[in-house]
Image (cartoon, rainbow, N blue to C red):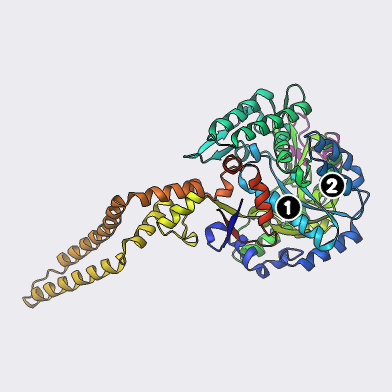
């Protein structure tokens, strides 16, 4: 499959001014990061740093479980070989992570992995080293609304959701175990939503095979949402050697003890550093992506009631909301005793999770989306307190897929990519203005000027007769201004009525490119495009995209 790649600067595709500056004016933000992701020499510097500082004993403690976890999904031989490579002292990782989503979630998850695989290959060749692409399944998260549904724009947007009982919805994703038939229903919903194409049977075979692999590794005829997510990703990407890590792996839970101990003992320093960086970013005109939970640790524990926060009071004592304990307040040692005895039920948050990842892995760089880049801008000093260094923070592929019929619609109404608006109504008005063939604003301004001159002439005639009619003329003029505005809207409306294909085209374009006023990559699932173009679309994008080009791309399918 061939593509035409177009890079855009249109602000609506860059999420925030911080992310836009990260892409276009990195020097404004460089003090918040350890490396310049655009400079290949910085990758070499990071690699040399890891050779000197990374504790190679760490990798030996989890690779066996990593092998078992990935092999359970019938991953490729190449993935298993990469895990063997990761055991060796001359190997490194690139990491991307995402909370679980059904059928991979929105497109941006797939785009992250595409960037991860492409950049791993580039660095392997450039520096003649082994670089293993690692995807961190953020199964410790619990934002159910973010992951329980996806959208398929087949004709109109169709939402596909998984049914999660209320009593499970507050748990971490890895703890949400649903029966096998719930996933079977979900697969059926997906297949029913897809149009009949030559590739649909292949998708059905893929999804049924994926279900079989997870069922084999499940318990009591059920399995977690996070395992289903890992199985889908493994099926799509393990041929590229992708290794999936789930922090639920027992060895990683043991490693998290050190992170939790650090979080408890250094909480004031951690939050103080984040506060300082937040104020610095605000002073520069940026937003704070990372909203600190005051008087809370940066870890949680799953109880029977869900994932619970750990509160701090002014006396440096702690309590766990929802924990079935008679003694509400806990000393630091008592808290550690509870957490470490129940380490399998603990989870880390957005501040502490990256520390675990970049401590246990020889990680050169982390591939991130816009929100994550904003998080990392606030936690560089937390890495320093922990005694490690923040890796290179690399923007993921950000893209919009343009199908041939959509490109034709845009050409027909002469709509340019750089002029796209989030709101379809406003887009239609702007497009119609451009198509009318004369300057409506100039026409209306000239009309208003002529009417104003006429009114002034008539007003002067009456003034000569010393008749005070100024208030009446002012009302007339104000009313005429309003009517001229109405006329402007009427001209566009009438032109739109006679050219209804423009409005229809705009709606069609927005459903595909900016569905529900969102970027396509944040709203649409990859299986919509696999159904139309086959699984090979992923391979072709990997082959076509350069991992060191970071502007938003429109990928036109020829």
User: Residue 480: x percent and y percent?
Assistant: 21, 62
Magenta range is 318-341
Camera-nearest residue between 164 and 268? 164
Q: Nearer the viewer, residue 506 or 406?
A: 406
User: In the current view of this chain or complex, which residue is farthest to the right?
Assistant: 57
The location of residue 368, given as percent across then percent down, is 69, 54
Image quarter of residue 178: top right
Q: Is residue 96 above or below residue 334?
A: below
Q: Point out the residue furthest to the left here.
A: 465
Mark 2: few, some, or many residues within 10 Å (few <14, many ≥20)? Answer: many
Is 119 on the left-hand or right-hand side of 504? right
In this orientation, does residue 332 appear? no
- The answer to whether 40 appears left or right of 526 in the picture is right
Q: Is residue 260 magenta?
A: no
Snapshot quadrant of residue 326: top right
Where is residue 433 shown, x and y percent of the image? 34, 61
Residue 86 location in percent, x, y? 87, 48
Q: Is residue 321 magenta?
A: yes
Report the residue marked by disc 2: 82
> Residue drawn at (61%, 29%), measured in percent from left and top?
186
Q: For the residue labelled by badge 2, is the local secondary structure a helix, a strand or a loop? A: helix
> Helix, strand or loop at disc 1?
helix
- Distance CA(mark 2)–CA(mark 1): 14 Å
Report whether 186 appears left or right of 476: right
On residue 190, the disc is none
Q: Nearer the viewer, residue 271 or 53?
A: 53
Locate residue 390: give its quadrant: bottom right
Neighbor class of circle 1 (other Cα within 10 Å; few <14, some 14-19, many 20+) is many
Residue at 56 percent across and 44 percent down: it is 524
Q: Are marks 2 and 1 in contact (CB under 8 Å)?
A: no
Q: Which residue is mark 1?
A: 116
């Amino acid at each position: 499959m061939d593509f035409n790649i177009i890079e855009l600067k249109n602000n609506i595709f860059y999420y925030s001014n911080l992310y836009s500056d990260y892409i276009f004016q990195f020097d404004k933000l460089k003090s918040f990061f350890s490396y310049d992701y655009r400079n290949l020499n910085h990758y070499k510097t990071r690699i040399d740093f890891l050779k000197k500082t990374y504790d190679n004993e760490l990798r030996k403690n989890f690779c066996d479980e990593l092998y078992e976890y990935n092999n359970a999904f019938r991953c490729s031989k190449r993935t298993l070989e990469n895990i063997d490579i990761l055991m060796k002292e001359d190997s490194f990782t690139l990491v991307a992570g995402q909370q679980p989503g059904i059928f991979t979630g929105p497109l941006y998850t797939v785009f992250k992995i595409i960037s991860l695989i492409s950049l791993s290959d580039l660095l392997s060749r450039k520096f003649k080293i082994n670089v293993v692409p690692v995807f961190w399944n953020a199964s410790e998260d619990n934002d159910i609304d973010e992951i329980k549904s996806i959208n398929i724009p087949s004709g109109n947007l169709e939402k596909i959701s998984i049914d999660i009982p209320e009593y499970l919805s507050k748990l971490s994703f890895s703890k949400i175990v649903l029966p096998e038939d719930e996933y079977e229903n979900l697969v059926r919903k997906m297949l029913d939503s897809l149009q009949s194409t030559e590739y649909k049977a292949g998708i059905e075979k893929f999804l049924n095979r994926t279900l079989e692999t997870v069922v084999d590794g499940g318990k009591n005829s059920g399995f977690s949402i996070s395992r289903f997510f890992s199985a889908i990703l493994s099926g799509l990407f393990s041929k590229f050697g992708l290794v999936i890590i789930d922090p639920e792996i027992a060895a990683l839970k043991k490693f998290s003890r050190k992170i939790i101990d650090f979080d408890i003992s250094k909480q004031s320093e951690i939050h103080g550093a984040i506060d300082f960086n937040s104020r610095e970013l605000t002073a520069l005109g940026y937003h704070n992506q990372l909203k600190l939970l005051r008087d809370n640790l940066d870890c949680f524990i799953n109880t029977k009631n869900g994932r619970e926060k750990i509160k701090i009071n002014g006396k440096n004592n702690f309590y766990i909301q929802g924990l079935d304990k008679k003694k509400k307040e806990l000393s630091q040692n008592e808290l550690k005793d509870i957490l470490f005895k129940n380490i399998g039920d603990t989870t880390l948050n957005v501040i502490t999770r990256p520390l675990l990842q970049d401590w246990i892995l020889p990680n050169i760089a982390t591939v991130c989306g816009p929100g994550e880049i904003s998080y990392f801008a606030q936690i560089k000093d937390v890495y320093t307190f922990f005694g490690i260094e923040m890796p290179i923070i690399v923007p993921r592929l950000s893209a919009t897929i343009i199908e041939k019929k959509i490109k034709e619609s845009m050409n027909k109404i002469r709509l340019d990519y750089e002029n796209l608006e989030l709101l379809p109504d406003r887009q239609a008005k702007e497009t119609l203005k451009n198509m009318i063939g004369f300057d409506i604003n100039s026409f209306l301004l000239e009309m208003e000027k002529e009417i104003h001159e006429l009114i002034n002439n008539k007003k002067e005639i009456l003034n000569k007769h010393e008749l005070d009619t100024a208030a009446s003329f002012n009302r007339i003029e104000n009313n005429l201004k309003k009517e001229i505005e109405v006329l402007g809207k009427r001209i566009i409306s009438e032109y739109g009525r006679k050219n209804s294909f423009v409005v229809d085209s705009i709606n069609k374009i927005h459903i595909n490119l900016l569905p529900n006023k969102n970027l396509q990559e944040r709203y649409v699932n990859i299986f919509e495009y696999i159904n139309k173009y086959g699984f090979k679309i992923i391979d072709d994008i990997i082959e076509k995209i350069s991992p060191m080009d970071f502007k938003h791309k429109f990928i036109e399918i020829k």
